[in-house]
Image: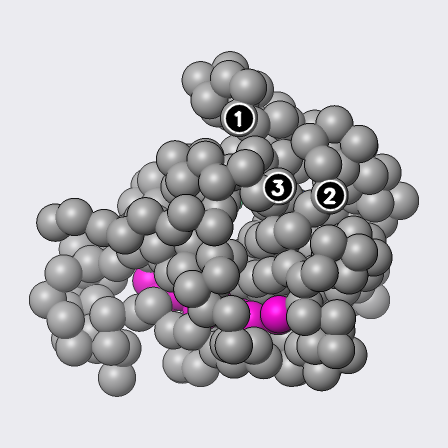
Amino acid sequence: MTYANYPSLAGRVAVVSGGATGLGEEIVRHLVAQGARVGFVDIDVPAAEALAAELGEAARFLPCDVRDIPALEDAIARFAAELGPVRILVNNAAHDLRHTIDELDVPYWDDRQAVNLRHHFFAARAVAPMMRAAGGGSIINMGSISAHIDLQDLVGYITAKAGIEGLTRTLARELGPDRIRVNCVIPGWVMTARQMRDWVTPEAEEHIRRSQSLADKVYPADVARMVLWLAADDSAMCTAQKWVVDGGWL
Ligand SMILES: NC(=O)c1ccc[n+]([C@@H]2O[C@H](COP(=O)([O-])OP(=O)(O)OC[C@H]3O[C@@H](n4cnc5c(N)ncnc54)[C@H](O)[C@@H]3O)[C@@H](O)[C@H]2O)c1
């Protein structure tokens, strides 16, 4: 198969959270392949440094735990100082740790919201002035199919992922007058290396076969291509929406 190129992404500055591995890594690679200059943060320093070394000048890595909001704001400011005003933000970092309801005490609950939801808002607020001054921008929040299907032991994660959809709509309204678009990408069950290692058992494969309309599994590149389109000027009048990449999960 051959895929689209997006001339509007050439030279544009993007920031991706959780860009070292999985979907985030694929999004970083796809943006760089379009000529964008990409800053990414992560806590997996060895994987991030290997990716940054491979991608060379086009990508910059700063270690940052997105639960630490001042550190995240500082990283965004440093990317902007080095690469230029941020025009694309992909809020991608997350952690789908399993837990029972009884395990969720207040600190654990707050931590699940901090790693999966809170940073989306503060990163958006940090880039908004730059986007406004540049005449617009695109913010892409990673939601999850988990907020729409029947799953257990993920109350903290699913609550956060559902919240991202509301955050997307309200931020789109708040920032739209400055031509800042805010969209939510909802991946289905995506075959990242970690998903394949931890969760994709033969029974899970059968579950995917039964649930998806399309025969093929969803891979990180399928989601990254949706992110490219939303980042590019091709989607100029699209905001406040959910974009589902799940193979038609019914
Ligand atoms: N893989 C799937 O099937 C799937 C399905 C639905 C939604 N999603 C969403 O897509 C996004 C990416 O998922 P993924 O499967 O690639 O996840 P992943 O766990 O494989 O990778 C997440 C990345 O974020 C980083 N990260 C985790 N905690 C962090 C923190 N506190 N600070 C900074 N970085 C941190 C990790 O080191 C990793 O590089 C997430 O928002 C996830 O909720 C994934």
Marks 1/3 in contact by CB < 8 Å: the verdict is no
**What residue is shown at x 33% (from left), y 62% (from top)?**
189
The answer for how far apart the CA atoms under marks 2 and 3 are is 7 Å
- The residue where tag 1 is placed is 58
* Residue 197 drawn at (x, y percent): 33, 41
Residue 139 makes an appearance in the image: yes
Q: Tag 2's secondary structure?
A: loop
Q: Is residue 2 left or right of residue 162?
A: left
Q: Which residue range is magenta in the image?
A: 181-189
| Image height of 46 relative to 11, above or below | above
Marks 2/3 in contact by CB < 8 Å: the verdict is yes
On whether ligand 1 comes within 8 Å of the CB at mark 1, the answer is no
The answer for how far apart the CA atoms under marks 1 and 3 are is 10 Å
The answer for how far apart the CA atoms under marks 1 and 2 are is 15 Å
The amino acid pointed to by label 3 is: Val
Q: Is residue 222 left or right of residue 111?
A: left
Q: Is residue 179 magenta?
A: no
- The residue where tag 3 is placed is 13
Q: Tag 3's secondary structure?
A: strand
Q: Quadrant of the C terminus?
A: bottom left
The amino acid pointed to by label 2 is: Pro
Q: Which mark is residue 83?
A: none
